[in-house]
Image (spheres, rainbow, N blue to C red):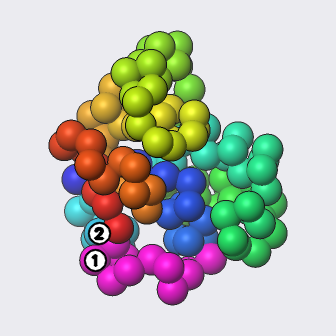
Amino acid sequence: MKILLDTPVLLWVAADSVELDEPARRLILDDGNDLYFSAASIWEIGLRGASSFDGPPVDVRMLRRGLLDAGYREVPLRSEHAMAVGDFEDLPVDSFARLLLAQARYEGLLLMTAKPGLIAQKAGILPI
């Protein structure tokens, strides 16, 4: 599977948090899965700070470098992603979550998320 981790999940992975449940942890540790993170998540953490996600402070440069070193692939922001955000304006989530959902759909990735507002969405969501 090709899995895009949303911002809170990305921070949980980096911190080896107990918030990350066992099924999600198994998917992340499965060498058969390709793991992705979005440039939008790096942007979001840089803007809001990790503490707004109930996590410890994070240096986004070190986080990005660590993810790349661990074999994660970065999904850059593209205009196609930005245009697709409007497809999800009815969701009760913020713009960053909509952007991640648009990226996942456009790039053919499953989005692993902890955001309840996305769980009810169509296929392509891995709720944790």
* Res 69 → quadrant: bottom right
Q: Which residue is mark 2?
A: 27
The foreground one among 39 and 62 is 39
Residue visible at 33% across and 26% down in the picture: 106
Indicate the secondary structure of the residue bearing disc 2.
helix
Residue drawn at the location 21% of the way across and 40% of the way down:
122
Lateral position of residue 31 relative to residue 16, left or right: left
Q: Magenta region: which residues?
A: 15-25
Give the quarter of the image for residue 86.
top left
Residue 102 in view of the camera:
no
Identify the residue shown where x is 19% and y is 43%: 123
Residue 17, picture quadrant: bottom right
Q: Is residue 124 visible?
A: yes
- The residues tagged by marks 2 and 1 sit, at their Cα atoms, a distance apart of 6 Å
What residue appears at the point 77 percent right and 50 percent down from the top-left corner?
Answer: 48
Residue 118 is one of the magenta-drawn residues? no
Q: Is residue 105 left or right of residue 20?
A: left
Q: Residue 109 appears at what percent x and percent y?
A: 30, 41
**What is the secondary structure assignment of the residue under circle 1?**
helix
Q: Nearer the viewer, mark 2 or mark 1?
A: 1
Mark 1 crowd level (few <14, some 14–19, many ≥20, 10 Å Cα): few
Image marks 2 and 1: residues in contact by CB distance under 8 Å: yes
Q: Dividing the image into 4 quarters, which one contains the C terminus?
A: bottom left
Amino acid marked by disc 2: Leu
Give the x, y percent position of residue 61.
Answer: 77, 52
Q: Say which of 29 and 20 sits in front.
A: 20
The dot on residue 23 is 1
Task: Give the residue type at disc 1.
Answer: Pro
Q: Residue 66: x and y, percent?
A: 64, 62
Residue 12: x and y in percent read 56, 71
**Relative to the observer, which residue lies in front, 10 or 52?**
52
Q: Is residue 11 left or right of residue 89?
A: right
